[in-house]
Image (cartoon, grey):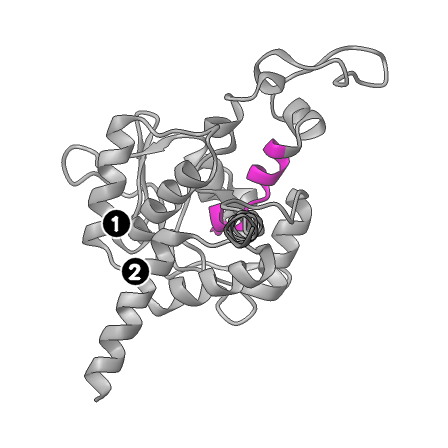
Amino acid sequence: MNILLLTLTILLCSGQASAHNTKISSFATAKRTLLQKVYYDHRQTIYCGATFSRDKNVQPPLGFHTLKHKKRAGRIEWEHVVPAENFGKSFSEWREGSAVCRDSKGRSFKGRRCAQKANRTYRYMQADMYNLYPAIGAVNAMRSNYNFTMLAGKGTSSFGSCQMIIAKRKAQPPEEARGRIARTYKYMEWAYPQYSMSRQQQKLSRAWDRQYPVSNWECTRAERIEKIQGNRNPFVAKACQKLYATSEALRK
């Protein structure tokens, strides 16, 4: 009887914590929460290190410029590091539509709009704050849904002093963003069975995770998101434990 009770207790406890987001299903709410409760004292974009104000106006770094989407260069947008299309296409509502996806004139629709309307799991994935980062709007627009890679040769920045290179429908991010990107991709694949990386993406994520360690800010960001969203990014958490242990050892 005691063994049965212990087994049930373990099962119940293990079911209390989810690997993925189950609290925030609104993309708008996730963006607002990040701005107000996560980035309130560290308003800096992921790719270009641009600062932004509480009303999302950007102060671009010296030497930044863009040839496209100039109207979006003055504001931040919340970018899905793992693009919504990459995981969205695994949902039938995105690919084929749903009976509930009809507009005011009775016409059916599919894609992101339908997945958002018809599938709760998709909404949780879309609103997962671990996968959302502030980016200059023009950079977000040009990155689109392109996969990250290392491009051949040194390449030329697409944004002047910001070392974000976009070419041939691929994106090479600045070095300071690569570790965060890698640990985000690994988290999304781990947390959501609907999403899986290609072998090339897995290999790149493992390499960047090793080469570019966590920063104090990445740890703080993850801790704040965990308190709000209720789940952990284990790839960041584990690295932060090592960082804190090393820092503590150096202080002794």
Q: Is residue 84 left or right of residue 243?
A: right
Secondary structure beneath label 1: helix
* Residue under label 1: 209
Q: Does the magenta portion include 193?
A: no
At label 2, counting other C-alpha atoms closer than 10 Å, the crowd grade (few under 14, some 14-19, many 20 or more) is: some
Residue 155 rendering spot, x and y as whole percentages: 20, 38
Q: Is residue 113 left or right of residue 73?
A: right
The rendered magenta stretch, by its main secondary structure, is classed as helix
At label 1, counting other C-alpha atoms closer than 10 Å, the crowd grade (few under 14, some 14-19, many 20 or more) is: many
Going 30% across and 60% down the picture, which residue do you hit? 239
Going 52% across and 72% down the picture, which residue do you hit? 41
Farthest-out residue, front: 1
- Which segment is the magenta one? 121-135
Q: Which mark is residue 239?
A: 2
> Between disc 2 and disc 1, whose residue precedes?
1
| Residues under numbered marks 2 and 1 in contact, where contact means CB atoms less than 8 Å apart | yes
Residue 205 rendering spot, x and y as whole percentages: 27, 41
Farthest-out residue, bottom: 252
Looking at the image, can residue 53 be seen?
no
Q: Is residue 98 left or right of residue 76?
A: right
Tell me the kind of residue under disc 1: Asp
